[in-house]
Amino acid sequence: MNSTAINSKLVIATAAIISAFVVLYWQFMPVVIGSVAEARGYSESELGFLASAYAGGLFLTTLSGVFWIRRYDWRVLIRAGSFIATLAFLVPLYYESYEMLLLCHLLASLGGGIGYGVTLSLLGDTKEPARNYAISFFAQVALGIVATLALSNIESPTLALKSGFILMAVV
């Protein structure tokens, strides 16, 4: 990407929004995990593994990013990561087994981690990376607050769980 395009307000805003969407699930995951506990009766250990699977996928993409971020077109990477994450958030709506939910948490974070790595790399290449990281962080926090407040006010654990997955699949 040329330096003029990368510094455009549209590119910076898009990168901030993509990074906010990736971090969004991490921010309202406690609501989803609590809903899983109530709706499906999983043990504390199983709930811990669900959260760890999501963290693990982000860790793997972050760790491996040095090998692929600059090697492939960023647009293709973001589309592929979005596709993987979207599928991973939709599957638990139809398959309710613990193993499938665990796998989907891992896949969703792998897909999201691809987008996150690319957007952070892209923001780091701008003329004002500190300012643009701050914009990205603001978008992450603001979106997280709104989504967490909305999901935590849903009375039914099953509805809150499904709403969280639908929200992530849509964004």
Image: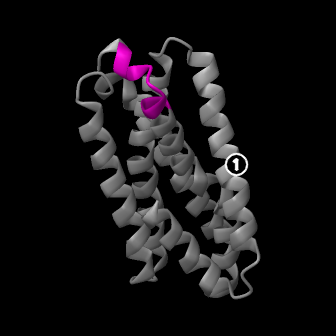
Q: Is residue 3 magenta?
A: no
Name the quadrant of the N terminus.
top left
Q: Residues within 10 Å of mark 1 (few under 14, many from 20)?
A: few
Q: Looking at the rendering, which quadrant does residue 85 occupy? A: bottom left
Between residues 135 and 9, which one lies in front from this camera angle?
A: 9
Element class at badge 1? helix
**Magenta segment: does it hold 7?**
yes
Q: Position of residue 148 (x, y in %)?
A: 71, 63
Using residue 55 as the reference point, say whether residue 71 is left or right of it. left
Q: Residue at x 57, y 70 (%)?
A: 164
At label 1, the amino acid type is Ala
Between 12 and 163, the one lying in front of the other is: 12
- Residue at position x 35%, y 21% from top? 5
Is 64 rendered above or below residue 22? Answer: above
Magenta segment boundaries in residue numbering: 4-12
Q: Is residue 26 left or right of residue 4?
A: right
Q: Give the residue at mark 1.
A: 142
- Of residues 57 and 141, the one nearer the viewer is 141
> Whole-percent x and y of residue 57?
46, 47
Q: Residue, x 36% and y 52% (percent of image)?
A: 82
The secondary structure that dominates the magenta segment is: helix
Q: Residue at x 23, y 30 (%)?
A: 73
